[in-house]
Amino acid sequence: MKNKIMERLKAFFHRIFKTENIRRIVQNASYLLSATGITMVIGIIQGALVFRLIGATSYGLIQAIMRFTNTANRITSFRINEMVVSFTRQFMETEEQDKAAAVYKLAVILETAGAVLAFALIWVLAPWGADFFGKRPETFPLWVFYGSLVVLNFSLESSAGLLQVFNRFRTQAILNVLDSVTTFVVVVVAYFSGWGWVEVLVAYYLGKVVRAAGTMVAGFFTARQEWGRGWWRPSIRILRPDFKPMFSFAFSTNLNNTINLVSRENESLWVSALLGTRAAGFYTLAEKIVAMLKFPVLDLSTTTYPELSREIARKRWDEVKDILLRSSRLAAVYFLPLVTLLVLFGKWGMGLVYGAESLPAYPLLMALTIGHTIENILFWNRVALLALNRPIFPTVINFIATAAKVVLVLVYAPQFGESVFAYVLSGYLIFTSMMIGGRAITVLRQKSEAQASEVTA
């Protein structure tokens, strides 16, 4: 019996890791995963210290400030890292080195302009944000202070995308750890010194500065290493024939990004606005716990996108489908047992780690886990369509789902509280993941059939 079980397990893992693409995805992800293991442990301890030190209300206020800055930055960033991965990889496959370098150069210019615009938005809107989201108008200078991060991040996404193109995942992993360690050290000092939420906000700020500076330096170094000392010299004009697909891609991804900001990535902001920072504190804690559990799957998404882009550029459709299938199996093997443990022991663990005050967040955690389980198994749904140069479909689906979600939240949240946000978000994640994932499979099937027809013709 034991031997049969072992044989079945070996066969199962062989089916997952059989192909070179999956082994490369996992190998690249292993650098990020090793960092994720460290950051998860640090994150759990850090989260416990912060929640015990400042409580749910101040915790919600800090998250409102951070999400406010992130929103302004994301609105103007055009998810430029995805454009770098898609088009730089495309030109590298066709050995057009000057064009590949020009894509990175253009991305840095666009991102820098976006950073300046984002900080201007923060500067103007900070007093309103402090009042509407934070419920404390006198704190608006701290909203501006944290918002200055967007200027320091002037080429963060561009450089992160370039590191992905050239498989510099170990560098990204090291920088992620440095970010976590920097924040953690300051939080520990704040906890044992009895400091307040302002010092905790500074801790988060310093960690982001370290990661941004390191990523940008690594990006410029990689560009010089791959394309030579004069990598920045090729004129952007050589991309003129490609401007239409590039800007169409950037616009579509930015529109999708903006919809995501409303639909799923700023939940705590809306909870704070409608129900107060205390409710937002509990909701954010549930979000943070789910996010920590999702880190390894997010790492797989990061390393899967370049592999998909490579195989699609080569028109190897069967290999693309194989990557998606095996990736879902791998995500399920990781996440499903974890969800089971969370259901069985999550409440006890939260009380032990975060204290009894945190327990109102447990029902929210369970509700969020439902949707995130489906999304994690189909984590590749959006990046697959992006790699297939189909960025509009996810945007349309997200828009439809977001419209329904906003209506449900506005109608029911004032009556039933923050649990409405959790259940509605889960429904949103299930609907969008299955619709977008199904569309990706359909497109791949069509391309595979068309290729087979050409061969037999």
Image: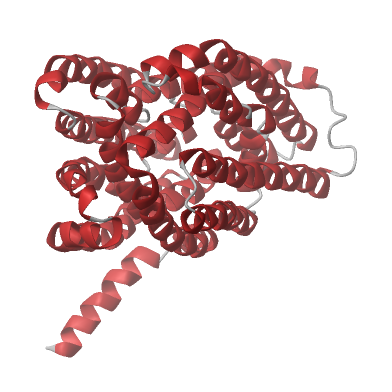
Occupied quadrant, residue 237? top right
Residue 378 position in % (x across, y down): 30, 44
Occupied quadrant, residue 45? bottom left
Residue 273 position in % (x across, y down): 31, 20
Q: Can residue 449 be seen in this view?
A: no
Left or right of 292 on screen, residue 388: right
Residue 389 position in % (x across, y down): 48, 28
Where the C terminus falls, by quadrant? Answer: top left
- Number of numbered discs visible in the structure rendering: 0
Where the N terminus falls, by quadrant? Answer: bottom left
Left or right of 287 on screen, residue 75: right
Measuring 54% from the left and 16% from the top, which residue is drawn there?
Answer: 248
Q: Nearer the viewer, residue 112 or 123?
A: 123
Compared with 390, 293 (above or below) is below
Q: Nearer the viewer, residue 202 or 425?
A: 202
Measuring 55% from the left and 33% from the top, which residue is drawn there?
Answer: 82
Measuring 26% from the left and 30% from the top, which residue is drawn there?
Answer: 432
Left or right of 26 on screen, residue 364: left
Residue 24 position in % (x across, y down): 52, 60
Residue farthest toward the front in the current orientation of the protein: 194
